[in-house]
Amino acid sequence: MDENIIKKYEKIMKIGLGGLEAIDDDIINTYGKYFKKGDFLIKEGEESRDVFLIMKGSVIVTKEVNTIKKVLAILGPGEIVGEMSFFESTTRSASCIADDDVITINFTDETFSEIYKVHPRWLVQILESLSKRIIKTMQVLKERIG
Amino acid sequence: MSQKINSDVYKFKKDHILYNEGDPIKGNSIFLLKKGHGQIIYNLKHDKKLILDIPVGSIFGLFETISNEEYRITKVKFIEESIVSMWQKEDFLINISMIPELGLKSIVCLSAFLRTLNQKIQEIG
């Protein structure tokens, strides 16, 4: 097998088996992306499918409602954004903007599926991230109604 | 009232309330609707409620359990006679590692739920 492919799979297995703690500089150099305050990770309405695992900094999730931007959530290290479009194959339902210097690990369809195949329990982290966001969003909804 | 069909599958009559807001989360706490129809009811302010359908094939009860909430935030009621698979959190997590489709389905269900909540926020402005 090609040496580069072996190295790639080693990195993917490392993330899958060890989760966040296994993500070292080598993995960040391969899959990492850097954003400055105000940079868009994701733009609402666009058709992209990358999944972002936040390693450093905070990310604001906004949605445009009648030309006004509403903040839905502020996410930090360990949380995941972009998985909704990944799993449902739909356009981006909200924008994600860097609130300070942000580092993410980016997964494409290919790398994300590979991690899943190697170690499906890694998905528990995504389930936790989504569940926490649901609870935050429910609180926002209750506040808006009141 | 429920009727045990096998070790993890139960049948519930129409109008049965599976759990109420404020109920402690313990034991079988994650569910898959195999047959019938249910509703998730979330109490908002001023007696307003958000009611979301649970169609066949949906996994529910998951977000409160996975995020380690002590008590239910929502109520779930069956509006038809329904058949439901149930898991304790630990068993569900083991199943995810063995049945990739279950993990994927869980994420799709949570994603769809989050998307619906976001749409509701958009509607009220």
Image (cartoon, coloured by chain):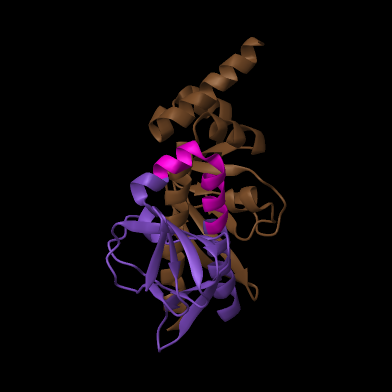
Rendered residue at 57%/16% (across/down): A7
Q: Nearer the viewer, residue B13 or A10?
A: B13
Query: Which quadrant, please, contains the N terminus of chain B?
Result: bottom left
Residue reaching furthest bottom? B46
- Whether B1 is drawn above or below A56: the answer is below
Region rendered in magenta: B93-109
* Residue B97 belongs to magenta span: yes
Query: Which tint was used for chain A?
Result: brown
Query: Which tint was used for chain B?
Result: purple
Q: Quadrant of residue B29?
A: bottom left
Q: Quadrant of residue B109?
A: bottom right
Q: Is residue B39 left or right of residue B89?
A: right
Numbered disc total: 0
- Magenta region, main secondary structure: helix
Q: Nearer the viewer, residue B4 or A36?
A: B4
* Residue B99 belongs to magenta span: yes
**Residue A124 in sight here:** yes
Q: Residue A123 at what x, y percent from top left?
A: 48, 42
Q: Residue A92 at what x, y percent from top left?
A: 65, 56
Query: Which quadrant, please, contains the C terminus of chain B?
Result: bottom right
